[in-house]
Image (spheres, helix red, strand yellow):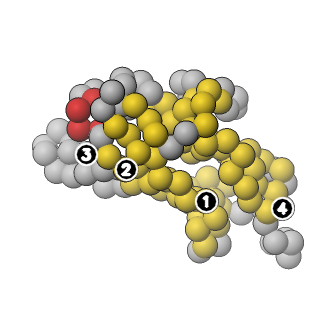
Amino acid sequence: MSKLKADISIIQSGIFSQWDSDSDELPRFLKATVHVPAELDMEFGFVTRIKKAKNQVLKYCIYHPDIPDADGNVRPPFDGEVYIKENDWKFYLGDCIWSPVSNKVGNWRMTLELNGKVIADKTFKVHNV
């Protein structure tokens, strides 16, 4: 593992075009904001630039505002891991509003963690239109 200290910055944050998870392309940045209208298919999140951390494990987590599942139970946060692919890598972490829109209002917190330390933390305020 590299002895260099990773360099991390959030380079874009706000509303994006729809993300295609099957593509290597990042979604197109549309508007810088933390205030997101609760509209169907509204895509929001942030892009980080991570340098000097190739092959390390990046953990991500999206905390939803008590959104119920089909059984009425609060959904757990959405989380996972990904390997950093390059020494100068851009990573998109985001989500979109799905139906029903009415229960998606509230604070959505998104975090990235590297080596046990939170390296990016952004909260979006989803509100009724």
Do the residues under discs 4 and 2 have CB atoms within 8 angstroms? no
- What is the spatial separation of the Cα atoms under label 2 and label 3, in whole angstroms? 11 Å
> Which of the marked residues, 4 or 2, is nearer the chain's N terminus?
4
**Decide: marks 2, 1 in contact (CB < 8 A)?**
no
What number is the disc on residue 107? 2
Residue on which disc 3 sits = 67
> What is the three-letter code of the residue carrying label 4?
Lys
Q: Residues within 10 Å of mark 3 (few under 14, many from 20)?
A: some
Numbered disc 3: secondary structure: loop
At label 2, counting other C-alpha atoms closer than 10 Å, the crowd grade (few under 14, some 14-19, many 20 or more) is some
> Residue 31 at x, y = what percent?
60, 31
Q: Which residue is mark 4?
A: 52
Q: Is residue 47 above or below residue 54?
A: above
Out of 107 and 117, give the one closest to the viewer: 107
Q: Measure the alpha-carbon separation of dots 4 and 1.
A: 16 Å
Location of residue 57 with respect to 14 vertically, above or below: below
For the residue pair 56 and 60, the one nearer the viewer reads as 60
Q: Nearer the viewer, mark 2 or mark 3?
A: 2
Among numbered discs 2 and 1, the one appearing first in the sequence = 2
Q: Residue at x 55, y 32 (%)?
A: 15
Helix, strand or loop at mark 1: strand
Q: Is residue 115 visible?
A: yes
Q: Which mark is residue 120?
A: 1
Measure the C-alpha gap from mark 1 to mark 3.
Answer: 23 Å
Image quarter hosting the N terminus: bottom right
Q: Secondary structure at mark 4?
A: loop
